[in-house]
Image: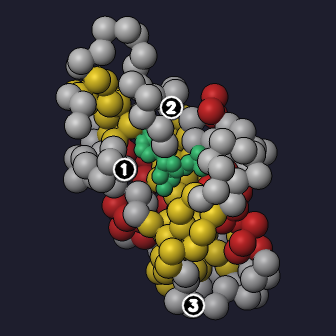
Amino acid sequence: MRPYVIDPMIPEGAIAERVAGLAAEINQAFADTEKLVVVGLLRGSFIFIADLVRKLTVPVEIDFLEVSSYGDATTSSREVRVLKDLRGEIAGRDVLVVEDIIDTGHTLAAVTRLLRTRAPARLEVCALLDKPSRRETAVQARWVGFEIPDAFVVGYGIDYAQRDRNLPHIGAVRFTDDASGDKFGGASA
Ligand code: IMP
Ligand code: MG
């Protein structure tokens, strides 16, 4: 593995403050819900969803979906493969998809397309991080925690090759063996 360091980007306290703010808006938007199905996209959203739901006051149910990109990852028609499907039904119900980070937007576009085929009453998305400069699709989250520049980030559930998910803050990966200025060293999302 190439050597790297993690430059701090978003401190733990700032994340907690923003999560509480997002939850307040979600509580308001879904104030009249019978029960909100909060769908976490595995694995990157596991810490975010755990913190977020503890700030929700509307009745909630928690479910998880795990997908992986497949096929030609460079084409814009990129689809996803369902690795772990929801346990519950969402037809006629209020659904909040919780994602760690929106990059090109292909994952979220495919996930919302899939979930809409199941006819939820309402379907909204809350993403902790958004890299708008990387977007390749028209997909948008109703709630975004932080817009960030085009950097490869880790921490607070988000990984680099399955590492650093346990970091309590969010930081940017910087390779230390690289003098060329290629800040991502060919790492991809
Ligand atoms: P998208 O389909 O390009 O929007 O990619 C979204 C997924 O790629 C996210 O859910 C993450 O799992 C992963 N990803 C995108 N950017 C990063 C990053 O900076 N660090 C770690 N994972 C990332
Ligand atoms: Mg992900």
| Cβ at disc 1 under 8 Å from ligand 1 | yes
Disc 1 or 3, which lies upstream in sequence?
Answer: 3
Viewer-nearest residue: 50 or 71: 71
Residue 119 placement (x, y as % from top left)? 79, 82
Q: Name the residue under label 3.
A: 88
Mark 2: give few (<14), some (14-19) or many (20+) Cα within 10 Å.
Answer: some
Label 3 with label 2: CB-CB less than 8 Å: no
Q: What residue lies at 42% left-to-right and 34% top-to-bottom?
A: 187
Indicate the amino acid at tag 1: Ile
Q: Can residue 119 be seen in this view?
A: yes
Viewer-nearest residue: 32 or 84: 84
Asked if residue 4 is positioned above or below residue 31 in the image, the reply reads: above
Q: Which residue lies furthest to the front in this view?
A: 72
Q: Name the residue under label 1.
A: 158
Indicate the amino acid at tag 3: Gly
Does 16 sit left or right of 73 as displayed? left
Image quadrant holding the N terminus, namely top left
Mark 1: give few (<14), some (14-19) or many (20+) Cα within 10 Å.
Answer: many
Asked if residue 164 is positioned above or below residue 172 in the image, the reply reads: below
Mark 3 element type: loop
Q: Which of the 4 quarters of the picture holds residue 94?
A: bottom right
Residue 30 placement (x, y as % from top left)? 64, 71
Does 125 sit left or right of 122 as displayed? left
Indicate the amino acid at tag 2: Ile
Q: Name the residue under label 2.
A: 148
Mark 3: give few (<14), some (14-19) or many (20+) Cα within 10 Å.
Answer: few
